[in-house]
């Protein structure tokens, strides 16, 4: 019989510090999908788009961990954070304005495993970019652990982050 272990944030950080390609979701450690060239290029383009659009109004935090107490430390492809120094502590839900997940092979995992964690944490907006279908799913306004709005953008439509009225991001 296999033994299953659950981790809190402190134990996870102590045991897995410096280990690449894993994340903690609701106390369980998951191996992340490898990042291919299409995925990496899309993340790089999004980082540039957000930096150009937002300047110093936010911190653009690519492929770094965030803390969602008590049992999750996911690594979204991109987080847009309130401007402050994160050198001493990882961002928490109160710091997060928008998360972006780029899904090449991970769409099911991102939508069914990570999205509910983000909603329960009260993260105001999550974008999941489906590379296979060229669609951007925007999940907005969490309430009681679910997102109440889910517009889907088609290629050519610009995304408008809730936290930055008037800002438009070309995602495709």
Image (spheres, rainbow, N blue to C red):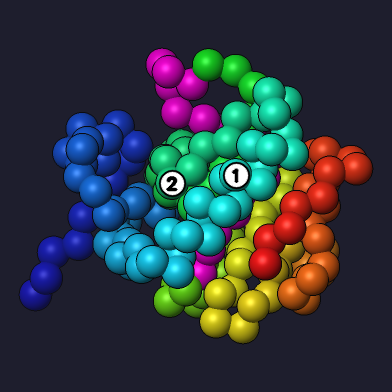
- Residue pictured at 34% horizontal, 37% vertical: 9
- From the viewer's side, name the closer residue of 108 and 42: 42
Instruction: Please tell me whether mark 2 sits on a helix, a strand or a loop.
Output: loop
Q: Of the residues under marks 2 and 1, which one precedes in the sequence?
A: 1
Q: Horizontal placement of 154 versus 59: left or right?
A: right
Which image quadrant: the C terminus?
bottom right
Q: Can the viewer see residue 12?
A: yes
Instruction: Please tell me whether mark 1 sits on a helix, a strand or a loop.
Output: helix
Q: Which residue is mark 2?
A: 63
Position of residue 63 measured from the top left corner of the image (x, y, whole percent): 43, 46
Q: Is residue 161 found inside the magenta-colored segment of the image?
A: no
Q: Residue furthest left?
A: 1
Instruction: Find the magenta span and give its range.
Output: 86-103
Instruction: Measure the C-alpha gap from mark 2 to mark 1.
Output: 14 Å
Q: Is residue 92 found inside the magenta-colored segment of the image?
A: yes
- Residue 48, label in figure: 1
| Camera-side mark, 2 or 1 | 1
* Mark 1 surroundings: few (<14), some (14-19) or many (≥20) residues within 10 A: few
- Residue pictured at 66% horizontal, 42% vertical: 50
- Residue pictured at 80% horizontal, 39% vertical: 163
Q: Horizontal placement of 26 versus 152: left or right?
A: left
- From the viewer's side, name the closer residue of 102 and 107: 102
């Amino acid at each position: 019989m296999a033994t299953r272990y659950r981790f809190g944030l402190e134990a996870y950080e102590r045991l897995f510090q410096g280990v690449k390609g894993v994340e903690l979701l609701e106390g369980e450690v998951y191996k992340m999908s490898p990042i291919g060239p299409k995925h990496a290029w899309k993340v790089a383009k999004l980082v540039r788009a957000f930096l150009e659009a937002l300047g110093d109004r936010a911190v653009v935090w690519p492929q770094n961990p965030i803390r969602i107490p008590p049992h999750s430390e996911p690594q979204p492809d991109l987080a847009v954070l309130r401007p402050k120094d994160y050198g001493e502590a990882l961002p928490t839900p109160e710091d997060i304005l928008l998360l972006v997940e780029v899904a090449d092979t991970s769409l099911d995992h991102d939508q069914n495993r990570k999205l509910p964690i983000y909603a329960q944490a009260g993260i105001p907006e999550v974008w999941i970019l489906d590379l296979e279908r060229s669609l951007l799913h925007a999940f907005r306004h969490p309430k009681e652990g679910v997102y109440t709005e889910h517009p889907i953008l088609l290629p050519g439509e610009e995304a408008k982050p809730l936290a930055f009225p008037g800002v438009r991001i070309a995602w495709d």
